[in-house]
Amino acid sequence: MGSGKSKLGKELATKLSLPFVDLDQYIEVATGKTIKQIFETEGEPYFRGIESQYLKELVLQPAAVVSLGGGTPCFFNNMSFLKKTGKTVYLQTPVGILVSRLMQSKTERPLLAGKNEDAVKDFMEKQLQQREKFYLKADHIVQNDGKLKAVDLVAVLN
């Protein structure tokens, strides 16, 4: 969350002349529910199951730049699947930048609901500690100091 996946993904897709797909938006369209509604009514385990299902469905679509939710690579062997079906990039972003972006964001994020800045910082540090072992399996690890541009990603991918 807050690493710039959607923003940079859209820019990268434009540079590569590929469509852009945000997995969360894809799920919302497919289910007719927001991610927040799915979390509230069905819970995170259910969400992670359908997230993996829709991720696999995307492979049947034409090539695209896909922005994933932060937990996507961490469940159901999704990272192995991703590496077999495309190139993976981890936008390694310092916690301070993530927290700043998340606190300024207008997007509702179910896992951050009701948290103040200190709680968001604690949450993000714990999430990264748990998830980074999956993220570090990405084909490309790119340092994101907040100034990263899509052109930098094109250079990494080529």
Image (cartoon, rainbow, N blue to C red):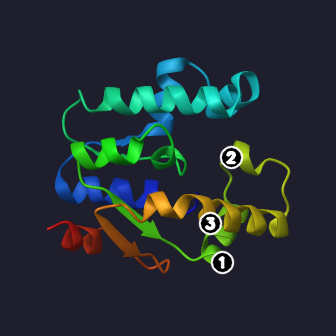
Quadrant the N terminus occupies: bottom right
> Mark 1 — residue?
96
Amino acid type indicated by mark 2:
Arg
Q: Residue at x 77, y 67 (%)?
A: 122
Toward which corner of the image does residue 152 lie, by quadrant? Answer: bottom left
What is the secondary structure assignment of the residue under circle 2?
loop
Task: Tell me if 33 is positioned left or right of 15 in this view.
Answer: right
Residue 82 % position (x, y):
31, 45
Q: Kindly report which numbered mark, 2 or 3, lies closer to the viewer in this rendering.
A: 3
> Mark 3 — residue?
129
Q: Residues within 10 Å of mark 3 (few under 14, many from 20)?
A: few
Quadrant the C terminus occupies: bottom left
Give the answer, above or below, for where 107 lies relative to 97: above
Give the answer, above or below, for where 115 lies relative to 28: below
- The alpha-carbon separation of the residues under discs 2 and 3 comes to 19 Å
Give the answer, above or below, for where 12 lies relative to 17: below
Give the answer, above or below, for where 31 lies relative to 81: above
The one of 147 and 59 positioned closer to us in this rendering: 59
Residue 123 % position (x, y):
74, 61
> Mark 2 — residue?
109
Toward which corner of the image does residue 89 lie, by quadrant? Answer: bottom left
